[in-house]
Each structure stands twice: as C-alpha cells, then as structure tokens.
Amino acid sequence: MKIEHRAEQFKEHSLIGSLLRKLHIDIPLLIGLLLLLILSFMMLYSTGNKEATLLIRQSARMGVAGVLMIVLAHVDPRQFQRFSILLYSVGVILLVAVLLVGDVGKGAQRWLDLGVFRFQPSEMIKITTPMMIAWYLSGHEIPPKWRHIIIAATFILIPTLLIVREPDLGTALLVASSGASVLYFAGLSWRFLLTSAFSLAALAPVYWHFFMREYQKDRVLTFLNPEADPMGKGYHIIQSKIAIGSGGGYGKGWQGNTQSQLDFLPESSTDFIFAVFAEEFGLLGCLGLLAVYIFIIARGLYIAVQAQDTYSRLLAGSLVCTFFVYAFVNIGMVIGILPVVGIPLPLISYGGTSMVTLFAGFGILMSIHTHKKILPS
Amino acid sequence: MRRHQVIKDSFLENRIFLSRTVILFVFMLFLIGGLITRLIYLQVAGHSRYHGMATNNRIKVTSVPPTRGIIYDKHGRILAENLPSYSLEVIPEQVADMEGTLKRLQSVLSIPEEKIEAFKKHRKRYKHFDSIPLLMQLSNTDVARFAVLRHTFPGVDIHARLIRHYPYAELTAHVVGYVGRINEQELKTLPAAEYRSIHTIGKIGVERAYEDILRGHAGYSEIETNAQGKPINELGKIESVPGADIFLTLDVDLQKVAYDALAEFNGAVVALDLQTGGVLVQVSKASFDPNLFVSGISYVDYKALNTSKNKPLFDRVLRGQYPPGSTLKPFIGLAGLEHNITHMHQTLFCPGYYQLPNKAHKYRDWKKWGHGKVNLDIAITQSCDVYFYDMSLALGIDNLSSFLHKFGFGQKTGIDLKGEKAGLLPSREWKRIHREQAWYPGETLITGIGQGFTQVTPMQLARATATLANKGYIVTPYLAQKIIDADREIEIKKPVQKTIELKSTNVQDIINAMVHVVHSPRGTAKRIAKNIDYQIAGKTGTAQVYTVKQDEEYNEEEIAFNMRDHALFIAFAPADNPKIAVAVIAEHGSHGSSIAAPIAAKVIKQYLLDK
C-alpha cells in the first residue's frame, strides 16, 4: 500500500503526472505494464536468436494495443455499462458465426475473416462476458438472489460452451472464470461457492475412472492441448523442467540460456517463455516477475475497491481476476503442476491476440479509476 | 429496455465487496505461494540435478522409431518388408575435428564423396546430439574393419537399423512404390515429432498413399548418458507403435506373368477384379529397382534411371496418357446403339476411305482396299474405321463426349494411389477453352476411332472395360484390400459404386461383337483363341505415334522403332460370366493383335486357371 501512496503523490505533483492524468492514464498500472513489456522485449530478443524480427512485430502489436488502451481509458465507464448488453450480444453472434463460417487454424475453428484482418471473437468475449454479468447483477439486489444467479450463469455458459465447441479449452476456461468472478464479487454465498467447487472436484475423478473409456481419456488429453503432439508433450515438460531447474537461484544471466536445451522447447517465445525466463534469471528473477504481477493485481483490486458504482466495481474486480488466471495457469503449466493448456504468459509471450484483450482490460480499469465524480468519502 | 430499479444497501454492498476482494487477494497470494514452492523445488532443491542434466546433456530424450508396416499381396506374399542393416552414424557434437574424422573414415571404408556431401546437407535438420547416418547398408567386412578402429573415432558408431526391402524389386516398383530420404520440402509439412527418428518416407505408390498407416507412431526414451554421450541408464520409455500391415488386391504371380509377357516391350498391363474393382495386375514397364532408393540413391544410378530412353521411373499405368485407338470402338458402338443412331442390321459399304460431304480429304481405313459391306458387328470384329467415321458423324461430338464421360474417360479413376492423371476426353467446350477454336466435323471422325485429342491412361482403359463387362456397373479400382493393425482389422472406406443406365440387349450385342474379335475367323485377335475352353471378349487397338501424310503409306519396316505405333488390347473373360478385365498397352508394338492381345490372353489364362 505504501508504494501506491507514493505513486498517488507523484501523480499529484509532477508535471508529467498531471499530463498523464489528463490522458486518463493510471501511473502505477502503467509502470507495472511497462516493466512487463521491457521484460517481454528482453525475452523475445533472447529467444528469437537475437534477431529483431520478433521484436518489431511485437512492437507493432503493442502499439495497436496501447492505442486501444488509451482510447478505452477515455470512455466514461457509464458508456460501458450502457453498451454491455449490445457488446455481449454481438460477441455471442460472432462466436456462432465462427462456428458456421470461421477459418480453421491449427485444427480449431477460431478465426473470423473480415477481409481486412482476421479476428478472434473469443478474445472479445473475454471482456464482454464480465461486462454483461456486471450489468445484469448491478441492476438487482446485492448479494444476488437465486433467480439472478441462475440467469447470470446462463449468460456465462452460452459463450463458454460455444468456445468449447471450437475447440479452445484455454479461452473457455478464461471466459468462464471471468464471468464467475463477477458472481463472486457480487457476494455469491460461500456455501454455494464451496459446494459447487467441491462437487465439481469430487465428480471429475469419478467420471474419469468410471465413465470414460480409454480412448475417450486419450481424446480428453488431446483436447486439453490440441496443438501439441501427444508424443511430444511429455518431452516438452522434461525440457522445460531442465531449463527452469538449471537456472538455479540466480539464473544463467540474460541470453545465457543454453540453446541446445531450448531447441527442444517449442513455443519457447510463446507459451513456454517462462521456462526461458526462469533459466536466464533464476529463482530471484522469477520472484521479481511474480512481484510485478502481484503489484499489478494489487493495484487493479485497489481500483476495484475504490470504484464508485456497483457495475464498475464488479467489472474491475473481474478483469483483474482474469489477468491473474492468465499468469497462474501459464506458469503452473510451464513448471508442470497444471495440464498443458494453450494460455500465454500475459504481456510477456509473443503473440498479439491476447495482448490486445489484456490492454483493453487495463484501459477499462484506467477509465474506471480516472472518471470518478468528486464525492465526499 | 427499462431497468428494474432497486433500492440498494450500498453500505452492505461495499462491505461485501471489500471483504471479497481481500479474501481473493489472500487466496491469490496463496496460489502464487504454491508456484514459488514449486520453483524453489525445481531451482534450489533440484538445481544441481537439473544443472547437471543441462550442462552435460546427461538426459537425452531420443525418439524410438516405429517399425513400418509390411505390404503383402493378395496371397500374403511379402512385397515390402524391413530388414536389419548396419549403418555408420555420426554424432557431430561429439566429433572434435569433423573434416579430419571424415577424411580418416574415408581411408578406412570406401565412402563416396557424394555421401559426405549428403551427410553435410542432412546435418541441418537433425537435433543436437542426434545420430546422423553417413553410410548405410554396410557389409560385414566393413563392420568388422570399423569395429577394430572404433575407439579412434569418438562420436562415430555403427548402428543396426531396419531398412525397407522390396523382394520383387522391378516387378512391383511402381505400384508398391518405395521409401526414400525425406527431403527439405517434405520436412516442412511433416509432423516433426513423428519423423524425428524416421529418415525415410513413402515416395510413390502404396508406400506414399498409405504413409500414415504404414508408418506407425514414434516412441520416446529418456536416457541418462555420460559426458561422451554414451547411454548409461534408461530412465523412462514410451514404446513406439508399429505401423499397420497392408494386404493388397495385387496378385504377384499374375503380375509376373504380365511383366514377362511384355518381354522386350515397354508399356503397361492392368487387370481388375470385375466384382470389386480390386487391382490384380498393375505393371508399368520399363521398371527399376526400388531398393536403390531406400538408403539414398547414388547420383550415378539416379542419372542413369532419369536419362534412360526407356523412362523406367515413369509410371505408365497412372500417368501415361495414350490415344486409345480402336479400343474405343466398342464404347462408340454402344453410344450409337444407345442413341438409336444405328442398329445391328444397318450396313454400310466400306471402300477403304471416308469423305465428308464436299471435302476432298480422305479419311483412311487401316485396310487400304476396304472391308466391303459391314454392319456394327463386323465393324468391331474387323475394326472397320469407315463404319465408325460414319456413325460418329451422325452421333455428333456432344453425344459422343457425354457418353464416353459416363465410362470415366477424361477423369481420374479415383484409385487409392496418388499422382493419377485424368487423360483427356475432348468436347466442343474443351476445345473452345483450351485451344480457343471451334470444333470441326473432321475431329469428330477421328475421335470416333480413338485418335485425335483423346488420351487415356491404362488404368482408365481397364476400368472402362470393366464397366462394359459389368454391363454398366462401374467399379473404382483400389489396391488396399485389408489393413491389419495389431491383429485388428481396420475398416477401409470403400468407394461408392455407380451404375450407368444401359439397355442390356445393346450391351450384349457389343459384347458379342467383342467375342467375335477373338473367336471369329475374321476377328483381329483370332490367334489368341487357340487352346482355350472359355470365351474372351476383346478389342484390339493401334495408337498412332507418327502421323502418315495424305500421300504416304505407313510402312512398318521403314520407320524407326520409336516412331512405330503403340499396340493396345482390352479384354474380359469369360465372356458369359466375366471375372477379370485387362488392358494392355505395348509401346511401339505396332499392332494390338500381334503384340498386345497375347499378353492379355496370358494374364487371363493364368487367372482363370487359379480360380
């Protein structure tokens, strides 16, 4: 909390601070994001055989994402609230369109070709689903009644199941968790939360052992990660562990990753980039990276708590929660405690689609924080 | 949409939200704590172990190649198998002085310069510490010679690998195909994990078409090695899954009869099982030894094959496109009957040539003095061109073309092999698009005797013949009869069969005429009728290679061998209850009757004898 106070002061007094404030930029968040982007550039330089191609492409994407963030930061949160239902409906329609006419890439149907550019509606729905749930719940009593919970759950299930059909389990997981987190923040009863969590956890192994045949299990395993070759999967994890473990406490230094090892590590600049990071910067570096993530999450939650109305509060909380799920699932998978699901390391991994969504989320957070009416506290 | 107004307890709401946020944040920190615990386990507790693995490459994950499926013929005789063979392999990372080592190796074993070049080229696509083959199929002497000096060559070793072997070599080269070294282009599209330990891929024939089934799946083994890369301990293993075995419809005895019968001629022989469409014989000659390709063909051998005037690498059955000549006449005759242009009793006088009204150009008959009075039966039996000129003119190119289309001319047969050509069935439309010209009546005439633009592949011709023998029931040729994967038979999707609507008396009239080709004293293929107790329905054909000018005569003796006509023959037997259909093309065999017909007869005889 101390750091944040300092940042607030900094914002009040400095000239740049006031300029950024006019731009509706939240300085602590910006600092956190910039730290991640610097790390991302360093990692991409290191994994991309020290060539600039990855960096240039990633910079272009960051430019687009950054502009989107600033634009969204300027929009009044009440506008988001007003357009929630429209944006959500458009998102769902596009998801249906993807299943009907979408492009197939890497064995899954995710893309919608709009002529000029290709578009992944499942990315957009990651933001519009919590918007919709927040809009819906904020119009009713808090904590929500049973009836409202069921309707809200339906709004979550529709896009989730559509994305499962694509199939894209990673994104479906993110969409479901983004929607569910709104319900959580709205005060869904603990009894309900714990019961559903336990029953899901209890049922999964029962189902796995008694109702699924061997070939179905195989399919589920493949389904978890359609991109990776089943024969190759165990292989990646071994190499990933060697890379991380050999990094030790202090790491081998920037660009000190043994390429011979990382040759075995496909996706070394995308989903498995954390392994490279851990090898180069060691446990210390990993703790630093986690600290940056915690800082961003803490700042985001602070913004959520400070938000003035129910809608902004629920939406902000959910966006932060999604960001956490991104980081946790990716790192968990790379260090081998979670199954391999195609989720990138937020703002570090190479690739544009998730980055644009994440920046859009931060834009909304900044909008919520910088459009407050002056009220006596 | 009006929103339901609620009176909210904003104090309660704030309290709930704040407590939820704090609890969630604590929970997140707890989960991150889990990540940190794991990281400490890997990076602090496991550091020395993983560090050792990384720096000394002590853990090597190697790919275990699957055993490729065996290809059998109809009777279970092996057409493609795997034989153990010794290869000399190098791990470049363990060789200090590569150039020097290669030089010294060359002094011990005779390694051609091109193998060295190939090795250097292949190096790029291997992973670090992979063993790269330098020389394959080492003789026992070579193995012994190297074994003595092995300790002086760190990083070089002899490995036993299974290599593909084709016991029937030339006989089944085009149809069974062969495996060869994976090239750079193929590598880009292949699943890398499967091909890490496999160095070859099916290039042509069944080997290529059924690559995914024959290949199997690679396994992995995690091996602990010493600093020199020598394995000490196997830590874990995923077994490879062998590829499935394939039983073909091909009968290798029959194949040999056909191959030998072609004798000195190049050409193609195809025989189909009439009931199923199964390919019994698929000979393309000249042929080559597919075993040469398995471990990388030498430049000299390849150049010899590639530049040979016999074109041994060319698959004549699926890619060879020939004018069908008179073998097309039964189909044209049937078109005439079906379109009511002619009937069996309609006659015409053949003076030995035909002229379009008001045109001076003489379309010649092969028989200079003409056949005299002919009906359709005689026209097929004696292969009278004039009758067909007249009939196809009356029929018109549109009817002719659409009728032949039904028999599969101008289209791929859909056989389960890759690289098939479609042949060419001319039509008004085709000529407008491809030649930007109108269709001329004279072209209808020559199309009617199987010359002109029309081109067929031997496989197409065999299939059309089968369709005729089946009275309109079209079969799609196929080779894979049965796929056995780990003692379990895998279902093969059978192609959809179609039937052409034909009047059965018309088909019978044509079949009778084709029987007369073989069994009547005036038939063009009468010499094969001797000593058989069943009837063959057939049709001879001659495809022009060299165009005779208006004022010239075709003189077989005078023109060069490679300008002589191709000899064709189509047949099925027994005529009353057909079992097998055969198409034969003998390149530069001059006459269908003397060269091609006896080849078909031998195949039919052998097949019916076995039955």
Image (cartoon, rainbow, N blue to C red):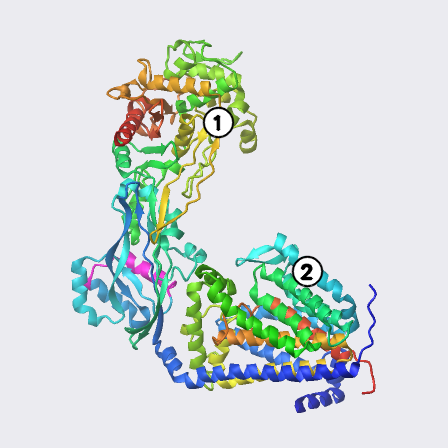
Please, what is the three-letter code of the amino acid marked with disc 2?
Val
What number is the disc on residue A215? none
Q: Is residue B53 visible?
A: yes
Q: Main secondary structure of the magenta part?
A: helix
Q: Which residue occupies the foreground of this view, A94 or A13?
A: A94
Q: Quadrant of residue B216?
A: bottom left
Magenta span includes B120: yes
Please, what is the three-letter code of the amino acid marked with disc 1?
Leu
Q: Secondary structure at mark 2?
A: helix
Q: Residue at x 46, y 83 (%)?
A: A251
Q: Where is B570 relative to B526, above or below? A: below
Q: Quadrant of residue B62?
A: bottom left
How far across and how far down the image is residue A128, in percent?
A: 70, 67
Please give the chain letter of the residue carrying mark 1.
B
Q: Secondary structure at mark 1?
A: helix
Q: Where is B276 relative to B377, above or below? A: below
- Residue B59 placement, left or right of B344: left
Q: Which residue position is annotated with label 2? A: A92
Q: Is residue B565 visible?
A: no
Q: Which residue position is annotated with label 1? A: B404
How far across and how far down the image is residue A366, in percent?
A: 72, 77
Question: What residue range appears in magenta?
Answer: B108-126
Alpha carbon separation for disc pair 2 and 1: 52 Å
Please give the chain letter of the residue carrying mark 2.
A
- Residue B157 placement, left or right of A221: left
Q: Residue at x 60, y 82 (%)?
A: B27
How far across and how far down the image is residue B585, in percent?
A: 34, 30
Q: Where is A256 relative to B192, above or below? A: below
* Rendered-image quadrant of the C terminus of chain B: top left
